[in-house]
Amino acid sequence: MHLTDPLTTHFRLAETQRSAMAKLGVMTVRELLFHFPFRYDTGGAESSIAGLVAGMDATIVGTIEKLETKKSWKRKIPISEGVLRDTSGKIKMMFFNQPYIARMWAEGTRVQATGKVAGKGDKIYLANPQLQRISIVEENLFKAQHEHGVEKSIDLETQEYPSKKSSGRLSVQGDAVGFQTFSQDIPESPGLFAVYPESRGVSSLWFRHAIAKVLTPETIEQVEDPIPLELLKRYNLPTLRTALVWMHTPEKLKEAEAARKRFAFEEIFLIQLQRQQERRLQSHEKSFVIDVPKKQVEGFMSTFPFTATPAQMHAVGAILGDMRTGAPMSRLLEGDVGSGKTAVAATAAYVVVNTRPTQEAGTLTQAGTLQVAYMAPTEILAKQHFESFIHYFETAPINIGLITGSGCFKFPSKVGKGQSTTISRAQLLKWVANGEIPILIGTHALIEKSVQFKHLALVVIDEQHRFGTNQRRTLAHKHDRLPHLLSMTATPIPRTLALTVYGDLDLTLLDQMPPGRKPIITEIVKPDERPKAYAKMREQLAAGRQAYVICPRIEEPDPEKAFALMAKSVTAEAKRLKKEVFQEYSIEILHSKMTPKEKEDTMARFSNHEIDILVATSVVEVGVNVPNATIIFIEGAERFGLAQLHQLRGRVVRSNHQAYCFVCPETRGEATMTRLKALVTAKNGFELAEKDLLQRGAGELAGRKQWGISDIGMDALKNLKLVEAARTEALQLIDQDEHLSRYPLLREAIHERAKSLHFE
């Protein structure tokens, strides 16, 4: 058996299993070995209903009967209630605040139920158990696993039990691998059973027995450890081979924890190495030297309709210091919603466009100025930045262009003073190419080959932090000088994540709000408190303000998928509010399925106060700026991440008026309420990001999709010392060996990781 072998070489997989494994990204023997458990259960003889007592954690295979939705007579909350039966008896199952469960599971379905046994005496029940459909093959595996409280092996192809084969696991001493058999006596402790990320067709039971087949001395000897041995010894981490055994078949939790720590360190260390390599290579590049007198900069900032905060002044100073050196700047500006990032970017742009291009000898080249490209993630946001820059530069004779998929604009207009005008795409591109338009704002249309700059010196990226060197070269369309990069985000990022993912960027925080801004009032709305919240909204509307109502989905789902009906939709909620609550106010909708023109028209009318209440999806999350909107009502709040909720409520802190945010969860479980209470109590986005990271379990994190980090890596980000250690070691290693020529396994590991992320 070889690590590169497809699983189909060694396992018979049904079509549903092939599909499930593809979804999980487990297609080879190596990928199976590196498909790690996210928790461990204790197993044993108590897997039959007859042996259950209150307080136990139990896993039972049985048949669902009489599952229906009821309401508790005391609290009037919806409950799905039914019976689970096995050969030893039956037990009631109760799912609180989950009425859709009864619609999801048919009578007679065979399931594996895992949950807490609650109740007293003979009146016990399974409280909110997790249910998973189970096949006949998996049921046989389950029986094998729990017989006599030890794991027995089963041939996954024939489902036959070998008669003379003892169960066991690999033993590890140092980096040597052997095979250790379990005692055939019933152990006092039932042991630990790995619980894996699953997909329909493959359960943790399947994975445990598949791992038993591939976790052999022959296979594991093929695994090479990329982490230098001296590093493992310094931090008391197990070798790769030891960690694999401890990860899948730990005898005690300390072994599993040590293995997780090792893999967490490895992942963060590899990311740090890659980032530091990128930073080192970039330091050898040349950029434009930009140096404008301090008084000139202060004169520009004095035209702002507000006084810059000390945090803004510090950020401007850091950016100007970077651009004076001639080495390409790479800086991430992180600031809470409303902290003034656009003003800082406008100041950086002002300095650039007031600098003439120079040759190497320092003499001026042909007429013109250096240029700025400002990229926003959406058309709505690009147009808002265009309007903001018009205000910032209205006293300066600077041409500003806007390019999006739906049209092009230029400021100032030759016809109307202080106004912009529409122009053809061809004309705009001609003026950008010859340097007549020094500031160009747009969406990803900026990266198109047809967009040519004459002297592009600064790229400003909003909410797109992994914009790399190659993309900057594409944007500049030249290879002699690299533009400076200023990346900006209002997304709260924990410090450990910023140190890891953005290790190649210098970080500047805008941690102060403009004077006069009042802290937003955030409240969790219980079902019986909804009228009170609506009364506050009505009060704000009567005072001439506007409101957002955010819903998790656009339209009502197919009636056949009744379990999804709990999530409120934009279309239905807008109709309900107009009919039942706010008949006298204008209500319209906004969502991602609308055309760019429809979205633009709706936002324009909302900005002009032709709309009182905008019912929308999270499409308004980033950058939408309507200062008169002071109240936001978020339905199904538990369906959004904390950072996303913080971004959404940032839509109503755009003025000095008191702002309100009402979050309305559909369910009120302990985990939901803990998360939402953090939203209420956190003083700012930075504090909220740290709380969010500490609260979320490894199985709930979406790190690989959002940041390119696995669940184990995201879990490691809770440990600042581990992250700092990995960063320190990476810096030292790159200082000694920039290209890692003495560490081919590390080079290969970095390459493989980058390739897998690119593939995803």
Image: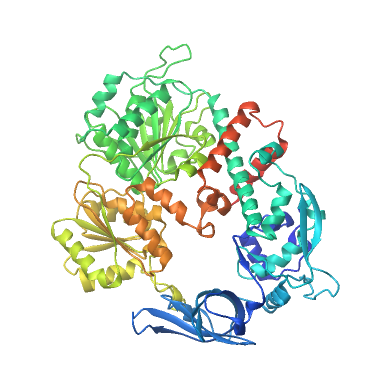
Quadrant in the picture for residue 156: bottom right
Q: How is the image coloured?
A: rainbow
Query: Looking at the picture, how far across and down is residue 350, in whole percent?
Result: 32, 27
Query: Looking at the picture, how far across and down is residue 561, in whole percent?
Result: 46, 76
Query: Looking at the picture, how far across and down is residue 44, in whole percent?
Result: 66, 74
Quadrant in the picture for residue 36: bottom right
Which corner quadrant holds the N terminus? Answer: bottom right
Quadrant in the picture for residue 526: bottom left
Instruction: Answer with left or right where residue 162 lies relative to residue 375.
Output: right
Q: Identify the residue shown where x is 51% and y is 56%.
A: 701
> Image height check: is 700 above or below 183?
above
Q: Can residue 131 be seen in this view?
A: no
How many marks can you see?
Answer: 0
Q: Which of 379 and 557 is in front in this view?
A: 557
Q: Nearer the viewer, residue 459 or 212?
A: 212
Q: Identify the residue shown where x is 72% and y is 56%.
A: 245
Query: Looking at the picture, how far across and down is residue 393, in whole percent?
Result: 26, 31
Q: Is residue 239 visible?
A: yes
Q: Identify the residue shown where x is 34% and y is 46%.
A: 381
Q: Nearer the viewer, residue 288 or 510?
A: 510
Q: Residue furthest left?
A: 543
Instruction: Answer with left or right where residue 693 lies relative to residue 40.
Output: left
Instruction: Answer with left or right where residue 686 lies relative to residue 497.
Output: left
> Image height check: is 310 above or below 289?
below
Instruction: Answer with left or right where residue 296 lies relative to residue 471.
Output: left
Q: Residue furthest right?
A: 164
